[in-house]
Image (tube, rainbow, N blue to C red):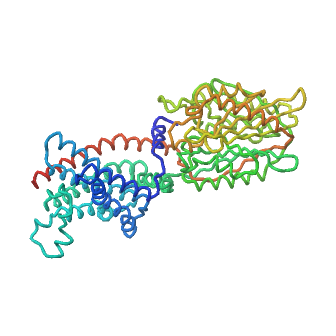
């Protein structure tokens, strides 16, 4: 992961699930009631709360229910959950602006007209916000999006018009007008200062904000179309859909960026003497990202649900360019894994675990029949993902001496988060890439020549009480112990797999010290489920590491007790999937980061200009 990719990954902290529309509406009425208590003074608290729910809450409720209905009939796709969330956010925005205006009025001695002007300004801002969201979600033109976007502002304006008695300034009258359009007698006195001209001002302000939204979108959209060939509205709309109700629209956006790729899917199967599966290591050569359950973010759990024996889905040598664009691509990988599993040639003998090191690069390898399981790490030095091409080259070096198939695992077990400019990505041409290949060549030769002896395997698993917010995914901690030989010549190699995304520095060494085995390695799955909380929510950052060490120690002991004679073997199948593609992640990250950095300044400039024009409208109208 590069620095810019790390910045993009930090967007995952905004990924959450909005409540059901009913919960949003309940909260909006509660906010309206509290605002009514603060804004009105009728000597009766319940009446003040009721008026707040009428003048503030009713526009929110109407907008929440009618906006999706109108939007869908105009070709949009706004849902009720999103609409309710948007209406609530806009209500809070109005309350905040009006409360701030009231405080300024008290301090500066302004009259009620100042607060009304602030209300008009707030309703204009609400229209602008809703217009941006509707255009982003529904991908509609400015004129079409104006219709559903204006509902909350329009309903609020109608209520103010009717209950302020503004109709009395017009040259109209009659029983119908007095009954339905002039109800100032039952309205709070705070609204009696409203004049018909104020509604003309509101209309003018809405036009200003509509033009500002269009200008803002055109400006920030240009680099996206030039660099990626897609619209920023596709990204914003997909992101809003994901946080509002967990939709897959963000995957549709990523699908427009994707490139076809052929990736190896390596499977190591372990079966008992009766033919039942005891364990299965599954390693698709992709990256389990980009975040949450989007793309391949939940790949480890999907793999675990697809196997009969205890599943071990470690991290492959692949970076963010090999993120799957949609979760549907996971099915393709699982089918390839099943095909590979059916083609396994099993053997009952294996070599002891052997280690090789070159520079910071450390490899633990164990041959099983004619195949080999190899786990790489750079701990205690910091490292992140190993590039796809580096992994292919390293595995090829290990096969030179006669190894048939190599499952090359990136242990992904020591990093310092997103700190610093270099996040430890092992790229082609780097010193570490050559160190890995050099060590793999020597290790492959040693494994080819090593004596093979009878193999026994034991496994253990604890789902743990930790959750993704603690840096631990649903697979918890899994241990496999490979015993080779019998009696005094017996050796044990332990593989510890933690369902998390990398590890805090030093934790790997603490865990290895607690493992009673001749050789061992600690791995993480690199699941991105944990990154819906924080971009660098690593194993050991939020939990008591002593508890994890104790758990691993117990699981290794349990796996040793579970050891029994087995057969094991490996096969590789190639799958065609759609991934982000070479350099697309970096381009997306740099473009998104530039939009965030420059977009904020641009937004302030556009908003400031819009407010300046709005103030000019107020002065001219006054």
Q: With respect to residue 260, does 488 lie above or below?
A: above
Residue 330 image offset from top left, x and y in percent = 62, 53
Q: In the current view of this chain or complex, which residue is farthest to the front?
A: 43
Residue 385 image offset from top left, x and y in percent = 58, 36
Q: With respect to residue 24, does 462 lie above or below?
A: above
Exactly how many numbered labels are in the figure? 0
For the residue pair 605 and 378, the one nearer the viewer reads as 605
For the residue pair 513 and 595, the one nearer the viewer reads as 513
Residue 182 image offset from top left, x and y in percent = 17, 68
In the picture, residue 183 is in which quadrant? bottom left
Q: In the current view of this chain or complex, which residue is farthest to the bottom?
A: 175
Answer left or right for 465 relative to 20: right
Residue name at image x 50 percent, y 33 percent = 418
Q: In the current view of this chain or complex, which residue is farthest to the right?
A: 487
Quarter of the image containing the C terminus?
Answer: bottom left
Residue 403 image offset from top left, x and y in percent = 77, 38
* Res 338 seen here: yes
Q: With respect to residue 125, does 558 lie above or below?
A: above
Answer left or right for 226 relative to 465: left
In the picture, residue 316 is in which quadrant? top right
In the picture, residue 597 is in which quadrant? top left
Answer left or right for 154 relative to 592: left
For the residue pair 308 and 262, the one nearer the viewer reads as 308
For the residue pair 173 and 260, the one nearer the viewer reads as 173
* Res 213 seen here: no
């Amino acid at each position: 992961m590069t620095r810019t990719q790390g910045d993009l990954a930090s967007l995952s902290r905004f990924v959450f699930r909005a409540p059901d529309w009913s919960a949003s509406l309940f909260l909006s009425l509660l906010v309206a009631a509290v605002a009514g208590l603060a804004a009105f003074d009728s000597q009766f608290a319940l009446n003040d709360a009721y008026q707040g729910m009428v003048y503030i809450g009713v526009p929110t409720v109407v907008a929440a229910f009618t906006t999706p209905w109108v939007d869908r009939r105009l070709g949009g796709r706004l849902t009720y959950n999103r609409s309710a969330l948007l209406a609530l956010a806009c209500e809070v925005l109005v309350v905040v602006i009006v409360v701030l205006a009231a405080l300024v009025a008290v301090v500066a001695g302004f009259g009620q007209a100042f607060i009304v002007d602030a209300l008009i300004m707030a309703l204009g801002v609400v229209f602008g916000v809703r217009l941006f969201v509707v255009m982003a979600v529904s991908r509609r033109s400015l004129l079409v999006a104006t219709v559903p976007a204006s509902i909350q502002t329009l309903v609020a304006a109608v209520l103010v018009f009717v209950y302020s008695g503004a109709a009395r300034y017009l040259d109209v009258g009659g029983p119908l007008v007095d009954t339905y359009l002039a109800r100032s007698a039952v309205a709070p006195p705070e609204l009696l200062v409203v004049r018909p001209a104020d509604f003309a001002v509101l209309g003018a302000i809405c036009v200003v904000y509509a033009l500002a939204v269009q200008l803002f979108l055109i400006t920030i959209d240009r680099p996206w179309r030039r660099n990626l060939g897609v619209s920023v509205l596709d990204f914003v709309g997909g992101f809003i859909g994901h946080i509002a109700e967990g939709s897959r629209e963000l995957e549709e956006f990523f699908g427009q960026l994707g490139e076809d790729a052929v990736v190896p899917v390596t499977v190591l199967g372990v079966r008992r003497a009766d033919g039942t599966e005891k364990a299965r290591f599954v390693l698709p050569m992709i990256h389990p990202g980009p975040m949450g359950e989007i793309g391949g973010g939940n790949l480890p759990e999907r793999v675990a649900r697809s196997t009969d024996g205890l599943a071990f889905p470690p991290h492959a040598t692949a970076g963010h360019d090999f993120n799957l664009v949609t979760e549907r691509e996971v099915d393709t990988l699982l089918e390839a894994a099943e095909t590979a599993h059916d083609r396994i040639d099993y053997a009952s003998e294996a070599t002891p675990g052997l280690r090789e090191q070159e520079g910071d690069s450390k490899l633990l390898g164990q041959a099983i029949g004619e195949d080999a399981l190899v786990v790489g790490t750079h701990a205690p030095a910091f490292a992140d993902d190993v590039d796809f091409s580096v992994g292919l080259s390293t595995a090829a070096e290990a096969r030179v001496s006669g190894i048939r198939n190599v499952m090359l695992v990136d242990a992904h077990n020591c990093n310092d988060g997103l700190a610093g400019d270099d996040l430890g990505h092992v790229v082609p041409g780097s010193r570490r890439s050559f160190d890995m290949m050099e060590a793999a060549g020597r290790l492959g030769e040693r494994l080819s020549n090593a004596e093979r002896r009878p193999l026994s395997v034991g496994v253990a698993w604890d789902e743990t009480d930790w959750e993704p917010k603690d840096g631990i995914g649903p697979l918890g901690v899994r241990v496999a112990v490979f015993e080779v030989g019998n009696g005094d010549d017996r050796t044990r190699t332990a593989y510890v797999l933690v369902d998390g995304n990398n590890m805090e520095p030093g934790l790997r060494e603490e865990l290895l010290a607690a493992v009673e085995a001749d050789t061992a390695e600690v791995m993480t799955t690199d699941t991105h489920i944990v990154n819906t909380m924080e971009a660098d929510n690593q194993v050991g950052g939020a939990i008591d590491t002593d508890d994890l060490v104790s758990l691993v120690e117990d699981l290794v002991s349990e796996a040793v007790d579970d050891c029994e004679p087995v057969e094991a073997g490996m096969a590789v199948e190639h799958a065609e999937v759609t991934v982000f593609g070479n350099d697309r992640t970096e381009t997306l990250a740099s473009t998104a980061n530039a939009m965030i950095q420059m977009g904020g300044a641009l937004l302030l400039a556009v908003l400031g200009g819009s407010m300046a024009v709005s103030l000019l409208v107020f002065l001219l109208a006054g």
